[in-house]
Image (cartoon, rainbow, N blue to C red):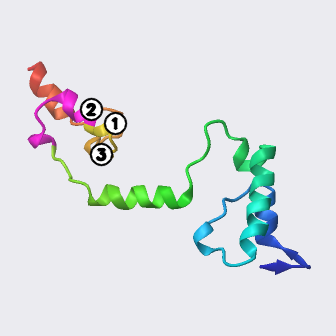
Amino acid sequence: MILNGSNINQSLVKSGNVFVYWQSIKGCDRQVYLRLEAYARLGGIGIWSVAGGIQRPWAYRQSKQSNTKRKRYRCKNISSWSAAQELLRQGHFYLDGDKDGDACESIRRQIAT
């Protein structure tokens, strides 16, 4: 996209505001974007300044798609409260109905009584 004679996409890459989505870069543009991303990455600019890095958007979307294809558990079918907590750590957030950080509290209450 060109605005006032400047390529906005290239400016965003150079300033470290976006990742290059390599699947969409064709031909000679690859070298330009490779150089601009390297400039931002090596300079620790923008997204490249975050310690530990940032998850790429396409990796995030892929993880969400694979989460929806994973087996869904129900609290009544989980053997223990600790097993429920492990499933929560693995990303089965729906097991924490009240969003307090504990999955399947009904199992814990059953053990306590």
Q: Nearer the viewer, residue 81 or 23?
A: 23
Residue 30 on the magenta segment:
no
Cα distance between the residues tagged 1 and 3 = 7 Å
Query: In terms of secondary structure, what is the magenta stretch mainly?
Result: helix
Q: Is residue 80 left or right of residue 67?
A: left
SS label for mark 1: helix
Mark carried by residue 89: 1
Three-letter residue code for mark 3: His
Magenta region, residue range: 75-86
Residue 58, image x and y in percent? 52, 61
Residue 33, image x and y in percent? 75, 66
Between disc 2 and disc 3, whose residue precedes? Answer: 2
* Residue at horizontal 35 percent and vertical 33 percent from the top: 101
Mark carried by residue 92: 3
Res 18 → quadrant: bottom right
Say few, some or many: other residues with alpha carbon within 10 Å of mark 1 (under 14 / 14 to 19 / 20 or more).
few
| Quadrant housing the N terminus | bottom right
SS label for mark 3: loop
> Which residue has dot 2 on it?
85
Say few, some or many: other residues with alpha carbon within 10 Å of mark 3 (under 14 / 14 to 19 / 20 or more).
some
